[in-house]
Amino acid sequence: MTGRATWWKTAIGLVLTALMLFPVYWMINVSFTRDRDMRKSPPDWFPVHGTVAGYRAVVDQQLPHLGTSLFIGAGTVVLTLLVSAPAGYSMAKLRPRGAGVLGFVLLIAQMVPGIIMAMGFYSIYLSLGVLDNPVGLVVADSTIAVPFGVLVFAAFMTGIPDELLQAATIDGAGRLRIFWSIVLPVSRNAIVTVSLFSFLWAWSDFVFASTLDGGGDRRPITLGIYHYIGNNDQQWNAIMATAVVASIPATALLIIAQRYVAAGVTAGAVKD
Amino acid sequence: MSDLIRAPGEARRRRPADGHGDAAGTAAARAHARARPARARSGRWTAWAFLAPVLAYLVLFYAYPLYRNLDLSLRNYTVRSFVRGGAPFTGAKNYTTVVHDPIFVPALVHTMVFTLVSLAFQFTIGMGLAVFFSRHFRLSATLRALFLVPWLLPLIVSASTWSWMLNSDSGVVNAMLHRLGIGPVNWLTSPQWSLTSVIIANIWIGVPFNLVVLYSGLQTIPVSLYEAAALDGANGWQRFWRVTFPLLRPVSAITLLLGLIYTLKVFDIIWIMTRGGPAGSSTTFATWSYRLGFGTLLPSFGPGAAVGNLLIVIALVFGLLYVRLQRRRQSI
């Protein structure tokens, strides 16, 4: 009965999803299109004469940039977790005076436009002589994720029952021990959510990359695509193939960790 | 047994304001009364020790760059003094330069149009989709998850894909329009269309966020309310306007405000698709600031930082509004 009542909704849903994902399909389609079919009018709706030339160009030219982006993403995750997990624990469970103000500061910090942070970082890195350095990008990229991370950890850890932590105190565990052996293992979901988003944001970052990393071999994949567009306006299959490869982490994470993604999107916006 | 007695005492020591407790707990607390001040002080130190990394982080990597940015906007920097230091202090001069620049008014208008039009469409489409997906049907969870893809893709990926789709000669959008008999539109290369083009791409990117947040808001509305409305003879349209919409108002306000703050600072999409052009026709505060600081061979960091700081002020006004709304919701 339900099947008959809802099949048309499923049909509408499929059509809407297809419309929404059409640009993604088009990116994939163009990435397999031959150079000489690129400016055909009307364009081919399917890659009938498919070619992997674009992907070969990715392997030849973009691999180092993918490596840099992986390094920056991983570094950002580590830095974000190191800074935000203890802070979340303190705000949720130890509640020192002034924790409310800190929460407020973190909310506001999330709203500072990236381009302004980029200008400040640029002037600092220039005087320190650390421009064009992936480690500098790790620090800059983590500023997108740290306020979010603290707020997610604090919200999650508030839900850990006090009895659990008190029992450990009675058994003689210190705060550090409690944090390491009880709070962190219990907060696995929050750790996954924060790691996932800090990785994605660092991987996708363009503002910091384009201001703090002028060029060279160690630039991340987002700049790889950007310079591709600037340098060879003809090879759109290579540009789109790089775009497809750059989209793999987002897609993989969505498939593997779908519920964490939804949790991260609504964190802060909706009270549970 | 002693464990059971001590546990409430522990809780009370940490939160003295906590009023109610049982007699045993009070006794335990009294027994520990002499040790309390020392314990409380050490507890406070531990709390701050756990906060120390984030505090150091905020000072070094938030406050300091923002200070440098403010300093940039208050001095007359040239490329040489930017590297070597010693730029003269000029007070608000960069700000007056920026405000009197012929780009200022168009950039302000573009920022407002870009933000408001994007928001209106993102919210309406997101709301429609959220209501649609909240009627459970086969595959609804999977399809809803697929809708997240545009939001998760790197912005450079989305922006370059849209650039190619909107290409005047070989883009698929013009190919479709041609089939409908509408002649080629110069989406990215004509001043009339460039702002529309970047708005279209931005709406596409923002719909998933609105969908997910509004959908989770919808889940908090009890089904019994809809059943009652249906019993009273309300049709689907009335149920939406009389039940869903009023109950979703707090979530909607938060979604719109967050969207506003995020849309104000959109830079990547516009810069990658049009670089704010042609002839400044899609320049917003964010792209203008970037162009002043980094987009030309002769950078003017001072005015660039000044534009950036004006953008911060606008974002902060709405940010404070957001915090107030959120507080009020949490106190209910």
Image (cartoon, coloured by chain):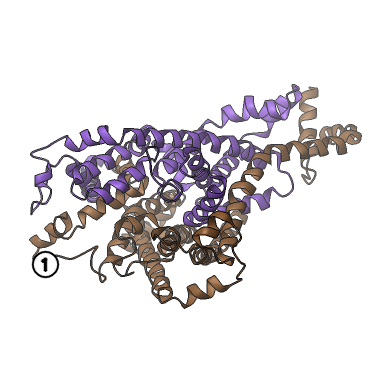
Q: Is residue A88 left or right of residue A45?
A: right
Looking at the image, which residue is at 56% across and 73% down?
B93
Q: Is residue B324 left or right of residue A100?
A: left
Q: Colour of chain A?
A: purple
Q: Is residue B239 above or below residue A146?
A: below
Residue A262, image x, y percentages:
42, 42
Visible residue check, residue B138? no
Residue B47, image x, y percentages:
72, 39
Foreground of the two, A240 or B116: A240
What is the chain identity of the residue bearing mark 1? B
Residue A128, image x, y percentages:
57, 45
The kind of secondary structure element at disc 1 is loop
Q: Is residue B264 above or below residue B208?
A: below
- When asked about the image quadrant of residue B198, the answer is bottom left
Foreground of the two, A111 or A246: A246
What's under tag 1, amino acid-wise?
Gly
Q: Colour of chain B?
A: brown
Q: Is residue A236 above or below residue B306?
A: above
Which residue bears the numbered disc 1? B183
